[in-house]
Image (spheres, helix red, strand yellow):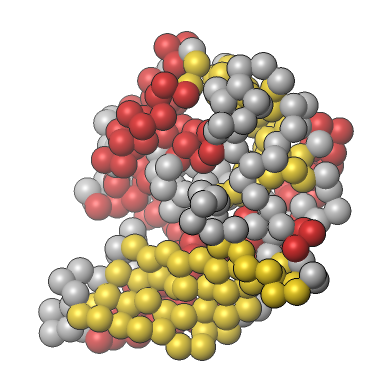
Amino acid sequence: MGLESPDDAGVYRLSPDLALIQTVDFFTPVVDDPYNFGLIAAANSLSDIYAMGGRPLTAMNIICFPAGKMPIEILREVLRGGIEKVKEAGAVIVGGHSVEDDEMKYGLAVTGIVQPTRILTNKGARPGDLLVLTKPIGTGIINTAIKGNLASPELIEKAVKIMAALNKEAAEAMEGFGVSACTDVTGFGLLGHAFEMIEQTDVGLKIFVEKIPVIEGVRGLASMGILPAGLYRNKEFRKDAILELEKVDPVDLDILFDPQTSGGLLIAVKNEEARSLVDKLRKRGAEAAIIGEFLDTHPSKIILEK
C-alpha cells in the first residue's frame, strides 16, 4: 500500500504474518508552549499508525530550527515533549535529522507493525455500518484564536489535552469489533476525511450534524469569524461532494470543515456493535459518539442531517 492508494500510511509486507507501516508528518507550532507543541506534534505523527490498525515501534525526529534566532532551550523542550509522547506510545526514538530554517517545525517519521490480515484502510465501509468519532472537533479554530490572543487559558488547556492525547486507547478499544474502515481526522477536516472513506465507491454517508462532539467554546469563536485559512480551502475542495449544504447552519458547516491537528479516529463499524464500541471508548476516557451511517444510496456523496 503506497503511492497508488491515498491512505493514512504506507504498508510493506515482510512475511505472511508481518507488515511494516510507515508514515511521516511535521508542522509549525500550533501552541505557544514548546513542550506542549512537542507532545502534540508527536501524537499527530503517531496517529496514522493507529488509524491503520498497527502498533508504533520506532520514530525519528524531523526538526527545522532557526538557530541563532531562537533559544536552544525551546528546541530542548519541544524534543522533551516528543520523547515523552513516544514513550507513552510504547515506541522509541532512534534518531532523526535537523536543518536550519527560518521557522520552527517539528514532527516524526514513524515505523510500526501490523498483521496483514488486520490492516485497516480508509475504504471498505459497508452500507448499514455506523460512523464513530473518538475526539471532539474544533482545534483548528482554537489554534487560530491562540495566534490572535483570543483564546482563554481554559480553552487552550482543553485543546492541548485533546491534541496531545494519543489515539492508542481508541485503536486498542476497537479490536474485536466488526470494523470495516478507519482513518484519522487531520488537515482536511471532519467532512474531508469522512468523504475519503466513500470517495469513488458505491457507498454514501449520512452525517448526523447535531451528534458531532464539538469542543466547548468553539462555536462562539466560529460565529465571530475566527477561522483558519485551511477551512476555506477544505470547503471549496469538497463542497460538491456534500448534499444539502444549505440546510446546515453556516457556523456548524465551518466547524465541519475546520482543519484538525491530531484529531480523533473515524471508525466504520457494524451497526449492532457501534453502541458497545462507543461505551468502551467512553470508559477509556474518549469523548466518542456515533455521528453517521453509511448508505447503499447516494454513492460517493455525504448527506448532512440535522
Q: Nearer the viewer, residue 57 or 165?
A: 57
* Residue positioned 59% across, 58% down in the render: 1
Tell me where residue 17 sits by quadrant.
Answer: bottom right
Residue 36 visible here: no
Measured from the top left, where is residue 168 in percent x and y? 66, 63
* Residue positioned 77% across, 58% down in the render: 118
In this picture, residue 206 sits left or right of residue 241: right
In this picture, residue 280 sits left or right of residue 91: right
* Residue positioned 75% across, 74% down in the render: 15
In this picture, residue 92 sits left or right of residue 153: right
In this picture, residue 219 sits left or right of residue 19: left
Measured from the top left, where is residue 303 in percent x and y? 56, 19
Tell me where residue 46 sits by quadrant.
Answer: bottom right
* Residue positioned 47% across, 49% down in the render: 186
Measured from the top left, where is residue 83 in percent x and y? 50, 81
The answer to whether 86 is drawn above or below residue 294 in the figure is below
Q: Residue furthest left?
A: 69
Residue 185 visible here: yes
The answer to whether 205 is drawn above or below residue 141 in the figure is above
Q: Nearer the viewer, residue 53 or 232?
A: 53
Q: Which of 69 and 105 is in front in this view?
A: 105
The answer to whether 130 is drawn above or below residue 43 in the figure is above
State the count of labels: 0
Question: For the C terminus, which image quadrant?
Answer: top right
Measured from the top left, where is residue 181 in percent x and y? 69, 44
The answer to whether 189 is drawn above or below residue 200 in the figure is below
